[in-house]
Image: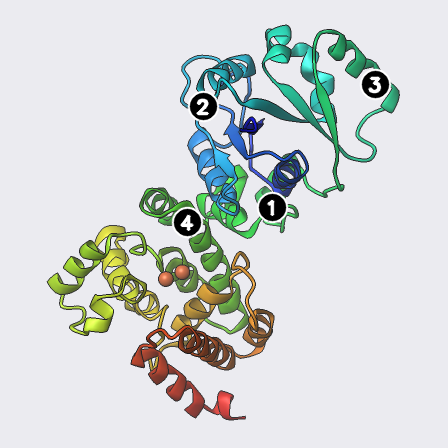
Amino acid sequence: MAKERIGILGSAFDPIHDGHLQMALRALDSAQLNRLLVIPAADDAYKPCIAGQEDRWKMVVAACSQDPRLVPSRLEIDRNGTAYTVDTLLALRKEYPKADLLYLLGVDGVMKLKNWHRLKKVLSLCSFLVCSREGDVSPIDFHEELVRLQDLGGQFVMLRMEPVDCSSSEIRSCLAAGREPSGISVPIREFCELKGLYGAPVRLSRASGWLDQLFFELKPRRFSHSLAVAAYARRLAGLHGISQKQAEEAGILHDCAKCLPLKEMQRIALNHRLTEDPAFLESGALLHSIVGAQVARDRYGMEDPEVLEAIAYHNTGHSGMSRLAMCVCLADSIEPTRENYPGLEEIRNLAETSLERALLKSLERTASFVRQQGKYLHPQTQGTIAWLRTLPECRS
Ligand SMILES: [Fe+2]
Ligand SMILES: [Fe+2]
């Protein structure tokens, strides 16, 4: 059996950005890695960070949810004392005695290797994948350093990378100034803004606590999706003259019940007499929306009936639903981290000008997809479609 090849990407991730992820994905594909451990540095004097380690951890987990080969690791965060890389490598060598360990570094990282604690030991524990971009450092200086490290036993493989226009410090400055940063994904940006990280002005005072709770209640992909829905619902609300605060709140919380076991959803639905419809009661996909409204009220303290309605209708819609609920329902199906599906761009374009027409298109697509799969389409979705077709915006 071929040896397992495990990549390692260690950094402050303060915050994690497209440059990190591009490096990780390029290494996975080009160096035939089986997986890549993404290891945020602990808060300590050796590697000073601006955001706290638990917030940086949540961002790393959310960002890694895009690819199952990216595996976040708390190896350094959970270690007591100074987190030297050599100790991380020793722990990994113990955990994976037969695997090849490949540590990812930029060219600038190679130039700083000479300062690493117990360098010779480090060089004996792993090889290095060096991600180089045009204009990194002087080729002569780099070559000289590489030869010196190879003489000490270091093994290096070069990976050519496309240039990326992002850096953690530039992203932090943009967030502090309320400007749009480039090179950061929508969910990570939303997380920073909702938490008020790096000096970003706080928009929703309760959101930071909600995110901490949701992080533990939801699977990583769902957590990241919730952040993206919040950002997109807020944007759509701004375009269509709807309360951005309510849209963002509903977006954050819309899937708060999604990862509950079906039995727990059923218990909540029956206790609160939310529905007697057997189709709802037997399907987590349907039930999580109305149960979500109840959970948002009971466990997250959301009392705004309009926000609760938007959460309850985010899946099937409802005839007579508010435009706020339309924003959330649409954002749920067209947020930027959604996998592409036929008609997605058309619905996104329609959503810029008409919520009603975009939602109609989106629900019609869902209905035809469900029928093609031979699955059950709930009459509430059909009822929403029929109602939307009667609206003047959709008839014109
Ligand atoms: Fe949902
Ligand atoms: Fe959702």
Residue 393 screen position, x and y as percent: 50, 88
Residue 348 screen position, x and y as percent: 57, 70
Q: Nearer the viewer, mark 4 or mark 3?
A: 3
Q: Residue furthest right?
A: 140
How far, Cα to Cα, is label 4 from label 2?
Answer: 22 Å
Mark 2 lies on residue: 75
Question: What amino acid type should be assigned to the residue bearing mark 1?
Answer: Ile
Query: Quarter of the picture for ligand 1?
Result: bottom left
- Residue labelled 2 has its Cβ within 8 Å of some atom of ligand 2: no
Q: Residue furthest left?
A: 271
231, above or below 171, in the image: below
Inspect this view and state whether residue 116 appears: no
Relative to residue 215, is residue 118 drawn left or right? right
State yes or no: discs 4 and 1 in contact (Cβ < 8 Å).
no
Q: Nearer the viewer, mark 2 or mark 1?
A: 2
Question: What amino acid type should be assigned to the residue bearing mark 3?
Answer: His
Q: Earlier in the sequence, mark 4 or mark 1?
A: 1
Q: Earlier in the sequence, mark 2 or mark 1?
A: 2
Which of the labelled discs sits on residue 184, or is there none?
1
Relative to residue 205, is residue 112 drawn left or right? right
Mark 3 lies on residue: 143
State yes or no: discs 3 and 2 in contact (Cβ < 8 Å).
no
Q: Secondary structure at mark 3?
A: helix
Q: Earlier in the sequence, mark 4 or mark 3?
A: 3
How far, Cα to Cα, is label 2 from label 1?
Answer: 24 Å
Residue 126 screen position, x and y as percent: 61, 18
Q: Earlier in the sequence, mark 4 or mark 2?
A: 2
Q: Secondary structure at mark 4?
A: helix
Which of the labelled discs sits on residue 223, or is there none?
4
Question: Which residue is painted at 48% across and 75% down in the image?
Answer: 362
Mark 3 is surrounded, within 10 Å at the Cα level, by few (under 14), some (14 to 19) or many (20 or more) other residues, namely few
- Residue labelled 4 has its Cβ within 8 Å of some atom of ligand 2: no
